[in-house]
Image (cartoon, grey):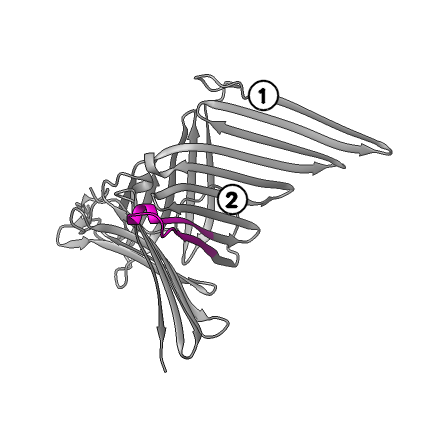
């Protein structure tokens, strides 16, 4: 199968805004410890690296935090925070990448009505559901606080007679309007689905493509569907039957017309986002990759950075991610340039390369 499409870097949890200004920011914090007393590379080198990507649109902020160690991809968390009317909302979703398993989900909602502050905290972990509702208000010299808790007792079944949650949102990304659906059940994360419609094809105004990508814990699936519009009937009413082949995890074929890949490239503030899907990739090749990059001036000279996530068909890790690659280059002075690179082969679950270099000219 071929799984792919390019929408955003990693999973989006909840968002409801219009077409507002957006920005894509982030950080890469890496510490490498070398112990010369140890024998062998694995024992002598220890690594902790945290990659944070933040997509801000309107009053909402969506964050992806990726943690890497010398043993590979160690932890993956997503969060969203923002306001919806009078409500403030924050939500955090955690995964265990090595085993492609759900870890925890916690959501907090707060609102202030007539001087009384209300908040609700929902927590889900390993079939254990808890809900805490609190209220606080002040009347003259009197302060009143109240809290009510439900669930949280553990066990093999969900509490509160809770069966699942479905969240649907719409938001702009690059040149497209994206509709997202997040589904959570008693076992935790079920799926995250992105949809976009009316992808135009140059010089073919009668044909547009609708695309859907769905992330589950251990795979991702893409579906491409054509939308044909031959215009209004004039005089003769023709019955037109256009046969397509595949379209789910495979090229979309119109007899001799084949759509074998799709890509997206745009600038979000000072950062460039690139996504490429190649449905013709052979077994063992990366069929899709997302890259965030920038090329700007640093404090002393040109600065460039790129961060890439690569996907392999039938990958063994979370969301089929197979490779994480990051590189940075900074010209500190006209005669001195510093560069560093980090590569983690997620498919084998190993930290595979750490490169530190410099160039001195005179």
- Tell me if residue 36 is in the magenta stretch: yes
Instruction: Answer left or right for 135 relative to 270.
Output: right
What is the x, y in percent for residue 230?
A: 26, 54
Q: CA distance from mark 1 to mark 2?
A: 24 Å
Question: Can residue 234 be seen in the rendering of this structure?
Answer: no
Name the one closer to the observer, 345 or 116. Answer: 345
Q: Quadrant of residue 180?
A: top left
- The residue range painted magenta reads 26-53
Q: Quadrant of residue 182?
A: top left
Residue at (51% x, 53% y) in the render: 56
Main secondary structure found in the magenta portion = strand
Q: Is residue 193 above or below residue 164?
A: below
- Label 2 Cα crowd, 10 Å radius (few <14 / some 14-19 / many 20+): many
Residue marked by disc 2: 80
What is the x, y in percent for residue 235?
A: 23, 54
Q: Residue furthest left?
A: 256
Q: How many marks?
A: 2
Q: Residue furthest front?
A: 37
Name the one closer to the observer, 169 or 9. Answer: 9
Looking at the image, tell me whether mark 1 or mark 2 is earlier in sequence order.
2
Which image quadrant: the C terminus? bottom left
Q: Is residue 162 above or below residue 17?
A: above
User: Element type at marker 1?
Assistant: strand
Residue marked by disc 1: 150
- Label 1 Cα crowd, 10 Å radius (few <14 / some 14-19 / many 20+): few
Which image quadrant: the N terminus? top left
- Tell me if residue 275 is in the magenta stretch: no
Q: Residue furthest bottom?
A: 362
């Amino acid at each position: 199968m071929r799984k792919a499409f390019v929408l955003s870097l990693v999973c989006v949890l909840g968002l409801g805004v219009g077409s507002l200004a957006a920005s894509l920011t982030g950080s890469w914090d890496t510490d490498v410890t070398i112990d010369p007393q140890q024998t062998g590379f694995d024992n002598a080198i220890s690594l902790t690296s945290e990659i944070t990507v933040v997509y801000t649109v309107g009053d909402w902020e969506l964050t992806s935090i990726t943690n890497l160690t010398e043993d590979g991809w160690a932890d993956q968390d997503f969060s969203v925070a923002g306001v919806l009317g009078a409500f403030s909302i924050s939500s955090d979703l955690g995964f265990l990448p090595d085993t492609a398993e759900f870890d925890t989900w916690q959501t907090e909602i707060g609102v202030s009505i007539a001087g009384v502050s209300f908040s609700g905290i929902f927590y889900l972990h390993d079939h254990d559901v808890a809900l805490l509702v609190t209220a606080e208000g002040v009347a003259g010299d009197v302060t009143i606080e109240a809290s009510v808790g439900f669930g949280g007792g553990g066990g093999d079944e969900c509490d509160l007679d809770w069966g699942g949650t479905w969240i649907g949102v719409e938001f702009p990304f690059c040149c497209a309007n994206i509709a997202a659906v997040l589904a959570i059940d008693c076992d935790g994360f079920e799926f995250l689905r992105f949809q976009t419609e009316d992808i135009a094809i140059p010089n073919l105004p009668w044909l547009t493509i609708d695309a859907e990508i769905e992330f589950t814990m251990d795979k991702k699936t893409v579906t491409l569907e054509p939308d044909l519009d031959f215009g209004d009937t004039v005089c003769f009413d023709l019955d037109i039957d256009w046969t397509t082949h595949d379209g789910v995890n495979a090229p979309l074929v119109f007899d001799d017309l084949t759509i074998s890949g799709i890509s997206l490239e745009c600038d979000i503030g000072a950062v460039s986002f690139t996504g490429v899907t190649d449905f013709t990739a052979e077994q063992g090749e990366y069929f899709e990759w997302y890259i965030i990059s920038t090329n700007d001036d640093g404090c002393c000279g040109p600065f460039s950075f790129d961060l890439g996530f690569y996907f392999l068909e039938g990958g063994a890790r979370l969301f089929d991610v197979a490779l994480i690659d990051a590189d940075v280059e900074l010209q500190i002075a006209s005669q001195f340039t510093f560069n560093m690179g980090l590569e983690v082969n997620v498919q084998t679950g190993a930290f595979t390369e750490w490169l530190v270099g410099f160039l001195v000219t005179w």
